[in-house]
Amino acid sequence: MGNWHPETLAVRAGYDPASASNAAKPPIYMTSTFAYASARQAKDIHEAYFDGTGPEVGKPGHIYSRLGHPNLDMVEGRLAALDGAEGAAVFNSGMATHVAIALAHLRPGDSVVFSRPIYGGTNGLYTNLMPQFDVTQAAFTDGCDRANIEGAVAEALAAGPLKLIVLESPANPTAAIIDIALVVEIADAIGLRNGLRPLVVVDNTLLGPMMQRPIALGADLCMTSLTKYCGGHSDLLAGGVSGTEALVAPLRLLRTTLGSHLDPYTSWLVLRSMETLHLRVERAMDNARKVAEFLRDAPRVAGITFLGFLAEGTPQRAVYDRQCKAAGSTFSFVLAGGEAEAFRFLDALKLLRFAVSLGGSETLITHPATTTHYAISAAERAQGGITDATLRLSVGIEHVDDLIADLAQALDAI
């Protein structure tokens, strides 16, 4: 599979028909437990799972579906192939994935650095939950500026050993971009200087594996909310992380204790949805560019963050050209006015759905300040460029003329 393109991997990786009576498509293994062929095999399978040794290592033996099951193996194999990684661990939500990474690597007295803006749940994890375990956090707001990033790193190191640098690029909800290779370089320098290198974790949700590969840019772990584009139909919850097998295997073992595995049916749904990922993403991105061009020229729109509009010659554009294959289909725009104007606009929409989440086949719009980022302080929202007039748009696969017509009539209703 090493020479196959991502579009082919999305259809073929992770499943061998020979493993299931030559069924062309994967069956769903709806079982909570698995029978052993013998008492000796039972012991060997447990040794392989918990110790990573013995004759069952590398074989498809299973114990109990909370520990793992064939459908989970399939979706993990496909995600790893798409991300260009050795292995992957899949969880029952994106936040379950983030929490597992945090609990696996952070201990009392440690520190973490993250980028801002960042998804509201991730922000809450590092500013509300982890401080209860005596973990200190620092954040940076310009992911293309070395001094800004190093300032947050210095703040974190002053508080304790820096174990994680967590990035979201492009960022939710503004599509702010972060130079992943630069952050990796900074992490390497910390390791050489202090003898302890922080892991670089990249949340790749807004572009996904088709449009950005953080592992190839030097990231240690690539996290993706599979709920979004990989699931793609707003009907499931899932999350995954890929990286070296040495980093991923402990996350699978921790998942056993947390009970945050992905069930067989949802694993099958994700595997099925991945097959059409590139088709849906390509159509959504074509639509997004046309919608963004309309909004850019609309008199009631004060600003737009679509990545395709990054100015030539800027650091952000240089990073975008270097690490992204395309602009994606989720971005923000700012209305002239404030919350009142945003609410009037939202209430006037007829086709676009006002809902949180992104990456579905339908176009979704939300008001981050009062929904996805409601629990974040106004000061923190301002640091991330989120105002009361900011709206996040996830463009879907409907006919673009209908989308633009609905946006136009809602703007006229402000």
Image (cartoon, rainbow, N blue to C red):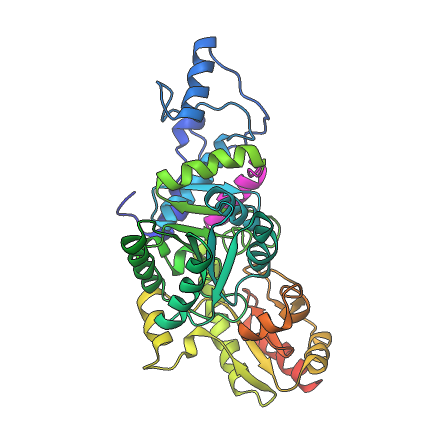
Compared to residue 98, the image places residue 334 above or below, namely below
State whether the magenta stretch is mostly helix, strand or loop.
Answer: helix
The N terminus sits in image quarter: top left
Magenta-colored span:
260-275
**Magenta stretch: residue 261 in it?**
yes
Q: Residue at x 45, y 14 (%)?
A: 43
**Magenta stretch: residue 207 in it?**
no
Residue 230 point in image, percent of width and height: 49, 52
Q: Residue at x 39, y 61 (%)?
A: 211
Looking at the image, the residue that sits furthest to the top is 39
Q: Residue at x 42, y 16 (%)?
A: 44
Residue 312 point in image, percent of width and height: 34, 81
Position of residue 1 in the picture relative to residue 285 (left or right): left
Residue 345 point in image, percent of width and height: 69, 79
Position of residue 11 in the picture relative to residue 339 (left or right): left
Q: Is residue 277 visible?
A: yes
Position of residue 210 in the picture relative to residue 398 (left or right): left
Q: Residue at x 45, y 25 (%)?
A: 50
The one nearer the camera, 294 or 414, is 414
Residue 40 point in image, percent of width and height: 43, 10
Looking at the image, the residue that sits furthest to the bottom is 299
Compared to residue 394, the image places residue 333 above or below, namely below
Q: Is residue 145 visible?
A: no
Query: How many labels sit on residues?
Result: 0
The one nearer the camera, 62 or 404, is 62
The C terminus sits in image quarter: bottom right
